[in-house]
Image: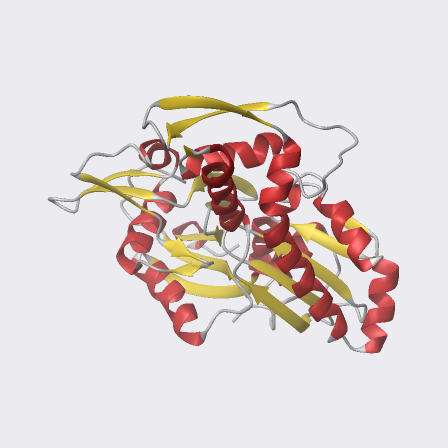
Amino acid sequence: MGLFSFLTKEIAIDLGTANTLIIFNDKVVVDEPSIIAIERNTGKLMAVGKKAMMMHGKTHDNIQTIKPLRNGVIANFQAAEFMIKEMINMINNKKSLFPPSLKMVICIPSGITEVEERAVKDSAEQAGAKEVKLIHEPMAAAIGIGIDVLEPIGNMIIDIGGGTSEIAVIALGGIVNQKSIRIAGNDFNFDIQEYMRKNHNINIGERSAEKIKIEVGSALPDLENPPDDYPVHGRDLLTGVPKEVIINYKEIYQSLDKSISKIETAIMNALENTPPELSADIFRTGIYLAGGGSMLRGLDKRIALKTQLPVHVADDPLKAVVRGTSIALKNFDKFPFLIK
């Protein structure tokens, strides 16, 4: 450790469409929704993360909530800069005579363009980073799960986040074959909102749809341990009056079926384009699931039925990517070709 190492702060960031996680000193120090709230008249930042999410869908004309990322990439540059800066400030609020030099590794979707990569780097640099490196999400997820990515063995990783589903075959420290589709957790929420409108004549917000997905979401029509029926509150489309509807997991399965089928198709396409020697490895090792979307009830079984391969869900799927990013940050020498 160098004499001035205390002046360098190394942080790993999983900059997600739905949630942003930051690891500092081997601990997850920030786990917040990727959203900010600003005052329209002045442009002043009012809240970030959980506090801003509590305002989402409940604001008046002078308050605007913004989600800076869409489909895994930055859609609002200034909002992303505000959000990154504030979340970094959450790590350590102590005022220092010498502000630390920030060294960051940020994970990005594998299907990202060079322009979108540049936007991520620029936002991080504007937020105070002196050195920014990027790593692809499937690679970070594989490292976070505990797979030795440097071995000449093929592994298939599926990372289902908020904005994108990343499907990649990894071997010898590189991505041999990848498919990135913009169908993920946020699309599941939209599907649930649409279903409630069409089948129950009730209008619900994005937060309510997320809650339904967590409480009674299902990828299969029949579950061994089904969740209890769930009361949903929203606005009646016919009368405009608030009302309650009781729903069950089979209804949510119906609403999500089309989007999950698209993810299955992408998985099958990725398997079709995998070199035969790596296909033989995947037959033995199976498929690994990470990301918040992988926690949907029955999704692992559904993918296993479709592919006829064993499917393993990461121990902590929400944090697999950020943990892998943190390991890559600490092992620049070991993984020199993983980080751009």
Q: How are the residues colored?
A: secondary structure
Q: For this rendering, which residue is in front, 83 or 192?
A: 192
Q: Is residue 227 above or below residue 148?
A: above
| Residue positioned most to the front | 238
Left or right of residue 159: residue 151: right
Q: Is residue 239 above or below residue 41?
A: above
Residue 126 is situated, as x and y percent measured from the top left of the image, at 29, 60
Q: Is residue 216 visible?
A: yes
**Figure label count:** 0
Residue 168 is situated, as x and y percent measured from the top left of the image, at 67, 66
Residue 162 is situated, as x and y percent measured from the top left of the image, at 51, 50
| Quarter assignment of residue 262 | bottom right
| Residue positioned most to the left | 41
Residue 214 is situated, as x and y percent measured from the top left of the image, at 57, 34
Left or right of residue 173: residue 73: left
Q: Residue at x 76, y 73 (%)?
A: 272
Q: Residue at x 70, y 63 (%)?
A: 267
Q: Residue at x 44, y 39 (%)?
A: 32
Q: Residue at x 58, y 65 (%)?
A: 180
Q: For this rendering, which residue is in front, 236 or 228?
A: 236
